[in-house]
Image (cartoon, rainbow, N blue to C red):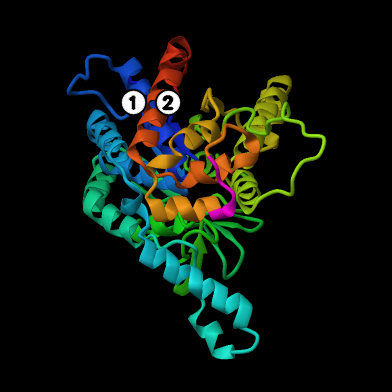
Amino acid sequence: MEEKQREPVGLVLTGGGARAAYQVGVLAGILEILDPDRSPGFVNPFDIICGSSAGAINAAALACRANDPHRAVDGLQDLWGNLHTGDIYHADAARLLRTGLRWFAMMSLGWLLPHLRNQQPRSLLDNQPLGKLLSNTLDFDRLKANLGDGMLHSLAITATAYTTGEHLTFYQSDGVIKPWQRSLRQAVPGTIGVDHLLASSAIPFIFPAQAILVRGQTQWCGDGSMRQLAPMSPAIHLGAKKIVVIGTGYKDDTHPEEKDVNPKYPTLAQIGGHALSNIFLDSVSMDVERTQRINELLELLSEEQAQGLSLQPVRTFVVTPSRSLDDLATVHLEQLPRAARTLFRVLGVSSASRATTGGALVSYLLFEASYTQELIRLGRADSLNRIDEVKAFFKETPA
């Protein structure tokens, strides 16, 4: 009798800068539920892994060790749990001052001294340390081996091309998968490396864009969460029938309860935090809602009608923080290096626990162990609080 294969499971890890530490905790909790004894033969539960922005880094790390999921997540916990700001971007006073002066000179004197435009800074912060960290941590040869050995079906990393305005999905698979293309979206097969991760995690204005060769043309690429209208789309195109989505946005970070009769003009930190939340969080919830509505529609149609629409049901399991990460970030603000802390305070960030203190902005850029460890603990607790749901979702059903 021919053995039936289980439905391919996809994992979608969204963006969020330092918030992505939360995803590691969720993954640790899921593996603890599925394999509490950490059996040596435990098989990677995610056939297709997709990541955007900082989620792309977690996705690649997981894929590179797909042959040993527990070890992969242990490594991620160790990485995020011992992180410091200097591991991600230069935060010393000299570099921040030099960058600040270049910005000031360009904006104040650029019209008078045109040669200054040629020396314009590329970003607010320099993430060169992140490139070194990724090169020393990730084994992309192991990724290729995992794909060849069937430990993983596909890895997909998203980025946005500033040159063309397109949203790009770079993917590496165990077989030939025809690239797909939609309006302002296209898929690019190839070999994924550190450059793709730096491009995907290049938060606009904060970190510099990365040059990527796309079909023979150089594209300057930035954060993969920009223009990401359908975060689950790559997983579906790559064959996922069930998808786990781990977001980094609290269900109500809008703080509608905070009303001020005479509110002050918003600080740059407030505006920046709102802009980043719009990039990283909103598209995820909308895509999940859209998928749920499509599933409801398909339930009402006959099999023939559904086939005519070229649609198929996709089960989703979504995990998001049960607490506001903005509030958690403000508690750990003092852990930042003094120069970085001063910069954020100039922008309007304070340690007060209110929506107007810029906690949203710093929650993306607070790469300090005290904060990331708390996010890991929160993620693990949030998944362990849903044991029955996790077991039901991963229960094998015939493909």
Residue 265 image offset from top left, x and y in percent = 74, 49
Query: Pointer 2 and pointer 1: residues touching (CB < 8 Å)?
Result: yes
User: Considering only vertical position in the picture, is 56 above or below 120?
Assistant: above
Tell me the quarter of the image containing the C terminus.
top left
Residue drawn at point x = 61 percent, y = 64 percent: 165
Q: Residue furthest left?
A: 40
Residue receiving disc 2: 379
Total labels: the figure holds: 2
Kindly identify the amino acid type of the residue bearing the numbered disc 2: Gly
Residue 187 image offset from top left, x and y in percent = 51, 55
Residue receiving disc 1: 28
Residue drawn at point x = 43 percent, y = 54 percent: 340
Looking at the image, can residue 47 be seen?
no
Residue drawn at point x = 32 percent, y = 46 percent: 84
Q: Is residue 360 magenta?
A: no
Check residue 223 in the rendering and tell me which mark sits there, or answer none. Answer: none
Residue drawn at point x = 73 percent, y = 23 percent: 301
